[in-house]
Amino acid sequence: MLVALADARPSTCGGKAGTLGRLVRAGLPVPDGFVVPFAARRTGPPGALPSVLRDELARALRALRDPPVAVRSSAGDEDGAHASAAGQYATALAVHGVDAVADAVRTCWASLASARAVAYRGATTSGPQDEPEVAVLVQRLIDSEASGVLFTPDTPGGATVVEAAWGLGAGVVGGTVTPDAYRVAADGAVTCDVADKRTRVDRHAAHVATRDVPAPDRTRRTLDDGAVRTLAALGRRVADLLGGAQDVEWAVADGTAWVLQARPVTAALPALLDRGGPPQGSPGVPGHAATLVGTPGSRGIATGPARIVRGPGDFARVRPGDVLVCPWTDPAWTPLLRMAAGVVTETGGVLSHAAIVARERGVPAVLGVAGATTALTDGVTLTVDGAAGTVTTHT
């Protein structure tokens, strides 16, 4: 009922696990693990974990010496060339012990029917669709000092874009931290835009916790030029093997760079501007237009009323054509992207899951606009320019 990661294929184990299996076979640095394939979910009542599968999980974990693991979905519609399903299915980090792993497997199976996954499939497919198959990937968790995402170039001679923050990558892909942004040119030249990285996610025993970053580290670079070039070279190896531009999640621990995931880039990045430019004018003051500057997240221009959304309790207030103004958007907010004209966030990077989904949907987005939920007034008319990284108020 289990497949060694090195033997995983997309046809039986989904795109995420199948791709990592290919990277393992090619000798790239991928954490050890195994896969609960599609077929295992069909061996018992819906949602139930057969006892024989639990026994095999226990044996496989013992073979890994029972470390904390990451348990992630690998669905049949994930990581495709035209739709990533980025962040739409379940992930559990720092899972320890067979009982907890078994629970996490069931959670991954159940996530197929989550509101965000159903909304994503409804927006990316036409006509009635069967629920996709799902496998579950179990890998040794990397306790990373720094982690993030990189995009390999989509044109010859283009730059590799790397986003990085302290700790585990959950904050970067989830958009809850604004990461450092690096660009590595074809000649190896590195440019860096250092962010104010206020929080980090780390493993503490058998759970993960978010904590404040010490003040001196908030504006300290997460990676030196050598480490950034190493990641860019690793990205090129992945792209050369898989073909086409790749979206690669990575982690660095004890001087080793690891590949955690690789999938095709489904929508091109907007041109990147320097982050954190000073606001021009005073937003929210009657009769006074103003512009806030952030990171271009998804190209396009949209105008609509601002809707301040600080959490799920505000979801019901969103109407078609609103511009979402929020602290961040995680994958649970995917249904809102079917209604929103544009998105403005206070934190997050251009390679976060929400930004990827916004680009796939063609929803203009500006990210990392510090204080946007307090500087902007609910209902005020905004114009979002997702290529320029600007948010302009109109009165």
Image: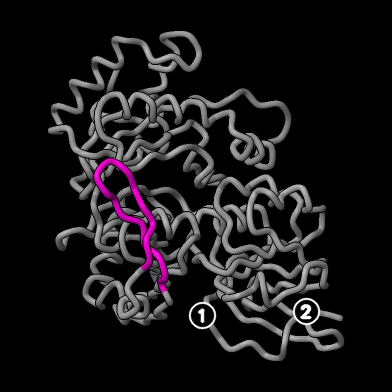
- Report the magenta residues as a range: 197-212
Q: Toward which corner of the image does residue 163 lie, by quadrant? A: bottom left
Task: Pick whichever, 277 or 364, lies toward us.
Answer: 277
Image x and y of residue 120, in percent: 63, 41
Task: Pick whichever, 6 or 169, lies toward us.
Answer: 169
On residue 393, the disc is 2
Residue at the spot x=51%, y=65% of the render?
348
> In the image, is residue 278 above or below residue 230?
below
> In the image, is residue 105 above or below residue 306?
above
Residue at the spot x=23%, y=70% of the render?
227
Image x and y of residue 73, in percent: 42, 34
- The answer to whether mark 1 and mark 2 are in CB contact below 8 A is no
Q: Toward which corner of the image does residue 286 lie, by quadrant? A: bottom right
Badge 2: how crowded within 10 Å, few (<14), some, or many (20+)? many
Q: CA separation, marks 1 and 2?
A: 19 Å
Q: In this rendering, does residue 279 appear at all?
A: yes
Which of marks 2 and 1 precedes in the sequence? 1
Residue at the spot x=78%, y=67% of the render?
378
Residue assigned mark 1: 275
